[in-house]
Image (tube, rainbow, N blue to C red):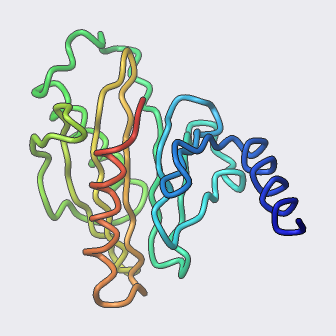
Amino acid sequence: MLLSCAALLEAGCAARNGSAASSPAAPTFVSRDGSIRYRMPAGWFDAGEDSLSAECRLWLMRGDFAGSLTVRRLHMQAVDPGDLGTEGLIEVARLTAALETSRRPGMVTRLPDRITAGGKDAVSYDLEYTGSGDRTRTVLVTAGESVYAVTALVSGNAPRDAAREIFTVLDSFLATARW
């Protein structure tokens, strides 16, 4: 009886926190703005409520703080969303990579290139930051009239094998997220 009550309370708390379970084994969560449905990677947690940025739609942290995954909406007032085919996204990726490395010293380690992410055409590029050794992989995807930058960060202090796992989490996130 006590276990039944605890299970009901836990289920009630999950619903209030914005999650909707598709099955007990694979719960689906909703970003704080309601625009993205996603699965939480094992060993990760949602740090989104700690984000001060209104543009950060989602911020997930690896349990040991060796990596993170963020989703932010890009604002491009001068670009018609209809003009953002893959070639247009490559240009946007070049611009965002240049802006990121101008704010925080670093270099592009993999030039923007076309990929498929969750069945959609997308563009991906990698950066490495000077001093900290942090590395990021950013994937630009379109959803409706919006362009999102999904970025996986590997801390310079991360364990040796963390990058592969964090970039695999990025791939899984992109394959299962619903915009």
Q: Say if 129 sits above or below 34 in the image.
A: below
> Who is closer to the viewer here, 55 or 10?
10
**In this picture, residue 84 sits left or right of residue 47:** left
Viewer-closest of 11 and 111: 11
| Residue 17 spot, x, y in % from top left | 74, 46
The residue that appears at 88% across and 65% down in the rendered structure is 1
- Residue 176, placed above or below residue 178: below
Where does the image place residue 42, in percent across and percent down from the top left? 48, 68
Residue at horizontal 44 percent and vertical 25 percent from the top: 75
Q: Quadrant of the C terminus?
A: top left
Residue 123 placement, left or right of 172: left
Q: Is residue 112 left or right of residue 146?
A: left
Figure label count: 0
When the figure is inspected, residue 171 is found, relative to residue 114, above or below; the finding is below
Given residues 99 and 35, the one toward you in this image is: 35
Q: Name above or below for residue 165 compared with residue 19.
A: below
The structure residue drawn at horizontal position 27% and vertical position 55%, both measured from the top left corner, is: 171
The residue that appears at 47% across and 51% down in the rendered structure is 39
Q: Answer with the quarter of the image where residue 67 lies.
A: bottom left
The image quadrant that residue 82 belongs to is top left
Name the spot of residue 102 as percent of width and height, x first.
36, 54
Q: Position of residue 35 (x, y in %)?
A: 53, 29
Give the residue at the far front of this rendering. Answer: 1
Q: Residue furthest bottom?
A: 160
